[in-house]
Amino acid sequence: MMTITTELAYLTPEILLLGLGSIILVIDTLYKNPDRLITYRLTQLTLVVVIFTLITQYSETTQHLLYGHFVYDSMSVVLKVAISTISLVVFFYSYDYLNEHDLIKGEYFILGLFAILGMMVMISAGSMLSVYLGLELLSLSLYAMIAMQRNSKSASEAAMKYFVLGALASGMLLYGISMLYGVSGTLDLQTLAEFITQQGDGNLLLVFGLVFVVVGVTFKLGAVPFHMWVPDVYEGAPISVTLFIGTAPKIAVFAMAIRMFTDGMGPLVGDWQDMLIVLAILSMSVGNIIAISQTNIKRMLAYSAIAHMGFLLLGILSGTYSGYAGSMFYAIVYALMSMGSFGMIILLRRKEREADRLDNFKGLAERSPWFAFVMLILMFSMAGIPPFIGFWAKWFVLKEVVAVGYVWVTVLAVLCSVIGAYYYLHIIKLMYFDEPEHMTAIKASLGMRVVLSINGLSLLVLGFAPGLLMALCIKAMGE
């Protein structure tokens, strides 16, 4: 049996993140540097330390720690490294934007660190209690981040909508957890799975509890019909906050779905599989169709995110470990694509306003041929056009759905993907075939240009060698 010291050693990344985040909070309070450069650099250093700790500590063993509330396994390490790395780049993209628009506050980075801590708790959750605690830590941090721009009516409205709807979804999730606990007498996900196996899948209370859990999880993913908050939050929040919301949390909620559905309620696979099929089809169709009519690129990417979450659900509903690996692959790839897309909006910003209209991309090929090419890579990848990595993300999940016999679902998914290609190609048309609204030079630091270029090119490079990332995901899922 492990000692408490040995158990805590596995929690070193979380302990470091909590400790260093608290220290940064004190430093930011004491040192009122207007540009918050110290806070920013300490935040980035913290994430580098956490990534280094996760990699050096890596072990292929699976450990259930803290009386089963915390799980250490390959999936948790890979996803934590992905979230920390993506957040590192997100903060890098955000810093210049926040400075230029006089929105720089130390709270953005500190709340970001605590949101990452919540994501890590969700990823390693071994019980329904730790799932809920991690989710609430993430959600409360995001509510505050959205509302930080207090003088903005749209940001305040977005924060209020997200808070009210998020509280409702959290309440439903908590109600579902309480029903599962009332029936089984346990919060531990492994023990819950054993109880369901013994009881069979005919217990009506277990199914009701499952319904509320599905509502809570799919709300956080932004799947239809629990998607109402996504477009308004994406559009109303500052682009730096939208950038954060649209990337790393998607990976964390994927992990939450795996923990709840497969680790805790795996024996009820037939029930949650049917629910996820409906939610996936609705998300892919509604997201792609409504995105076509959008003129604001943040709202377009919001509906695009809804559609992509439908594809992510396809791998989970397959009920196989290779399907889960496909969804894990999709979550990571989507975060990379979303990060690059919002990074382009930040790149094209001007002092007086954000570049959040589709018309802002008109004639970009004349203004900056290189970044028009980077945006082309991002849009082709999101559309799922080969050889970009977005194509392989869709291919892997669709392959698993076909393998379990849901050919009709695959056909509908392909049709939705074809519909979605329209609005991605529309942006490419604006960049290469329309006249620019102005010829103002793109003002961005060399670092921003280099990192955004690497972000875009990585989607092309990974597209030529998707097997490396997919092998990592398969190994992480324990297959």
Image (tube, rainbow, N blue to C red):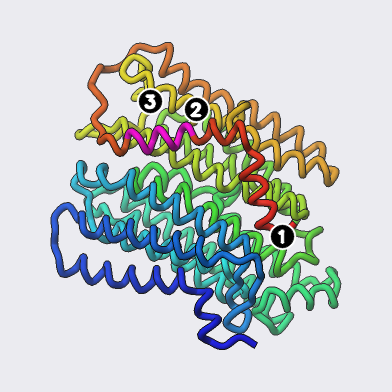
Q: Quadrant of the N terminus?
A: bottom right
Q: Mark yes or no: residue 22 visible.
A: yes
Q: Are marks 3 and 1 in contact (CB under 8 Å)?
A: no
Of callouts 3 and 1, the N-terminal one: 3
Percent from the top left, x then y, of residue 129?
57, 76
**Residue ID for mark 2:** 377
Q: Residue at x 52, y 67 (%)?
A: 57
Which SS type dominates the magenta stretch? helix
Asked if residue 13 lies left or right of residue 471, the reply is left
Name the residue furthest front: 56
Count residues near mark 1 (Cα–Cα under 10 Å), then give few for <14, some for 14-19, many for 20+.
Answer: some
Of callouts 1 and 2, the N-terminal one: 2
Q: Quadrant of the C terminus?
A: bottom right
**Residue ID for mark 1:** 478
Report how far apart the C-alphas of labels 3 and 1 lie in the structure. Answer: 39 Å
Percent from the top left, x then y, of residue 353?
25, 34
Amino acid found under the numbered disc labelled 3: Phe
